[in-house]
């Protein structure tokens, strides 16, 4: 086996390596550009066209649900009157 110097060097590596990795990978300047690019891809700025399309889709879905609900009510009313 090794003497105490080898054991001290191994213990130093066991302690320095994770601390060094933690320090390196938590530096904001290394990842800032990448994070900004990814954020812009994942959450694009709302444009008026996209917002309008989204609102129109919601309105159409609500109208469709309302028409279906009224149709079901009319069918139920016809069955009750017959």
Image (cartoon, rainbow, N blue to C red):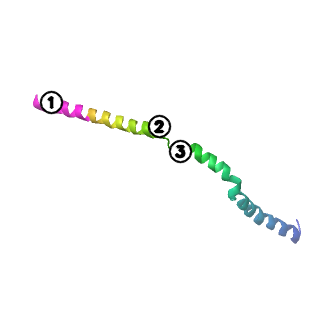
Residue located at (43% from left, 36% from top): 53
Q: In the picture, residue 43 is in which quadrant?
A: top right
Proximity of marks 2 and 3: CB atoms separated by less than 8 Å? no
Q: Nearer the viewer, residue 45 or 11?
A: 45
Residue to which mark 3 is pinned: 45
Residue to which mark 1 is pinned: 79
What is the CA distance from the residue labelled 1 to the residue labelled 3?
Answer: 51 Å
What is the CA distance from the residue labelled 2 to the residue labelled 1?
Answer: 45 Å
Q: Residue furthest top?
A: 82
**Marks 1 and 3: which is nearer the front?**
3
- Asked if 9 appears above or below 31 in the picture, the reply is below
Residue located at (83% from left, 70% from top): 8
Residue located at (43% from left, 38% from top): 52
What is the CA distance from the residue labelled 2 to the residue labelled 3?
Answer: 11 Å
Q: Position of residue 48 (x, y in %)?
A: 47, 40
Tell me the quadrant of the picture where the C terminus can be found.
top left
- Asked if 80 appears above or below 21 in the picture, the reply is above
Q: Which residues are magenta?
A: 69-82
Q: Position of residue 20 (x, y in %)?
A: 75, 62
Q: Main secondary structure of the magenta part?
A: helix
Residue to which mark 2 is pinned: 49
């Amino acid at each position: 086996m090794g003497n105490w110097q080898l054991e001290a060097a191994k213990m130093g590596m066991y302690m320095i390596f994770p601390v060094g990795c933690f320090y390196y990978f938590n530096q904001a300047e290394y990842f800032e550009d990448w994070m900004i690019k990814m954020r812009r891809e994942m959450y694009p700025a709302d444009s008026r066209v996209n917002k309008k399309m989204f609102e129109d889709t919601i309105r159409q879905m609500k109208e469709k649900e309302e028409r279906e609900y009224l149709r079901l009510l009319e069918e139920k009313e016809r069955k009750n009157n017959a």
